[in-house]
Amino acid sequence: MAAVSSPAIIEASFVSRLVTRKTVMIGLLIIAVIAVLAILAPWIAPYSPSRLSVVNRLKPPSGIYWFGTDEFGRDVFSRTIYAGRLSLLVGASVVAFAAVFGVTLGLVAGFFRRLDTPIARIIDAMMAFPDILLAIALVAALGPSLVTVIVALGIVYTPRLARIVRASTLVIRELPYVEAARALGVPTWRIMSRHVLRNLVSPILVQGTFIFAYAMLAEAGLSFLGLGVSPEIPTWGTMIAAGRQYIGQADWMTWFPGVAIILSVLSLQMVGDGFRDLLDPRLRKDL
Amino acid sequence: MTDLPADTVLRVRDLQTHFELGSRIAKSVDGVSFDVKRGETVAVVGESGSGKSVTSLSIMRLLSSPGRIVGGEILYRTSRGEVVDIAALPERTMRSIRGREIAMIFQEPMTSLNPLYTVGDQIEEMIRLHEPVSTAEARKRAKRMLELVEIPAADRRLDEYPHQMSGGMRQRVMIALALSCNPNLLIADEPTTALDVTIQAQILDLLRRLQREIGMSILFVTHNLGVVAEIAHDVVVMYTGRVVEKSPVESLFAHQKHPYTQGLLACIPNASRDRGAAGERLRLNPIPGNVPSVTALPPGCSFAPRCPYRIEKCEEAPPLMEAAPNHLSRCWRHEIL
């Protein structure tokens, strides 16, 4: 039993172990830089992302246009950091959507035996679809817009979270302290929120990081295919889609948004991996 | 509503709890009856598989499927004096009985507390759940509860996590938790089994003192007859889901009227008794054989295959007979025992 240490101690050692991990630190640093750039885009961007300048079209990167310009003479750097706002917004919203619905479904399925089979089967059925294909179908059905993209990707990633929450709930539900709580008259919803959900924070956190990355990638994919937000709003996906036509003359148009996608997804994955390595052993011990 | 004698808190009558496993039916509790009087302790004794824990879970209505109460009554007198049949109560009413009227503590003090919250948090939660009091008031009462169960430095202990405490301490916290809503009846399911002997004695002392002070009744489930002698007023001995012997504690220890109870007592190692004529150590005296599965009970007396006194008549199931005043036995040969 000595292996179970208090959350306070775990949190302290968790943070200290986290910062000693190079990959996690680098990942967090990159995400922080991207987030700051995106949030402060209106102050950082040298030009408006929609400012046209026909004389300066398809200019290569230089001191004036750091990332070059696109076919309308718009500044690629400004557009890249503005596009980051949208990517982060989509990522965060999808994680929030999937967390709310996935955690609810998973808890209900894991806690109430009668609802387990139907919910678990629906989750399995949805997981059988390839992510991007399901998202494309949903966006096609609902019509492309920012909200649709978020909802569609939220629906795609909800089963992933629900499955993890359900599995953990099944284990925790049988723990002696849950039975003890029930024997002392703690109502079911309180057992679910206080005793079960609190135990699930780390797997949800880990999965949330991954979903954030997948959602950013999927949004770029959808935008690239013309199924995302309207083309005049800069997103990394639409920028790459537009740059594709000029890839022979102006490869910077695809390079920079591409690198932005790679860096943000890679760093989120690095952080998620780090979280998983650090949190899972503790989870196994505690359960 | 059926009536209950004024001094009786709980009357279990002909309780039948079955587990349906496909076509087989496990009669884990098969016609168990006993009374718990106000301020007294009844011990339910038996080996693993005797149905003692299922009996206590039935009273709490905490059976997990496919377990089900299929017959009998569990009459309980609430603190307001009403008599209710727990076996027939809707789940919603039952929730207001758990904790507030009947509380239960378990065998595993190591895992019965949530490792993620301080013990203070957990006791305060319990108090606030059942009574509308402020956070400050709940904390004050949580501290009083820890003092009641004799935990030193209660103020500091409130902010500790379960892992920072020893098993005995945790069981004290569990008792504090169970008592924080002033239950009428405490069901203790082997609360001292996981503890070493000195801590066991302390916990038993504590329960006895609390019973004297608060006047609650205790239903004590155990396999340890030594513990029974310490704490119980009445004893119910169970075997394969049935009561085989029932009597006041003095009478039971003076003369056991069922060979199973005799066997249980003979199992207890005794340093002076277990010596031969030359002072050499003798072997322990286990009851031969195993508890038969409740899905495949032998016909007649279920203890007969293991019984040294078995006769032909044992192929016929014995009823519960009065072997001495107030002393019931389910053995055809209780007179010669």
Image (cartoon, rainbow, N blue to C red):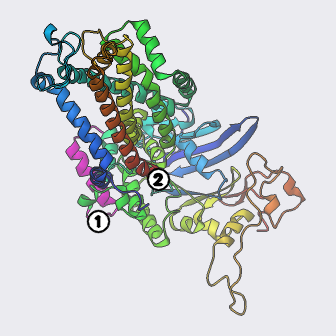
**Residue B320 at what x, y percent from top left?**
73, 52
Badge 1 marks a residue whose secondary structure is: loop
Q: Nearer the viewer, residue B150 or B77?
A: B150
User: In the rendered view, does B139 fall on the left or right side of A107?
Assistant: left
Front-most of A111 and A3?
A3
Residue interval drawn in magenta: B130-153
| Label 2 vs label 1, nearer the camera | 1
Q: In this picture, is A182 found above or below B313?
A: above
From the viewer's side, name the closer residue of B146 and A233: A233
Residue B30 part of the magenta segment: no
Q: Give the amino acid at mark 1.
A: Pro
Residues tagged by mark 2 and mark 1 found on one chain of the structure = yes
Residue A133 position within the rendered picture, expressed as x and y whole percent measured from the top left: 48, 17
Q: Chain of mark 1?
A: B
Amino acid on which disc 2 is placed = Ser
* Residue B214 visible at all: no
Residue sitting at 56 percent across and 32 percent down?
Answer: B88
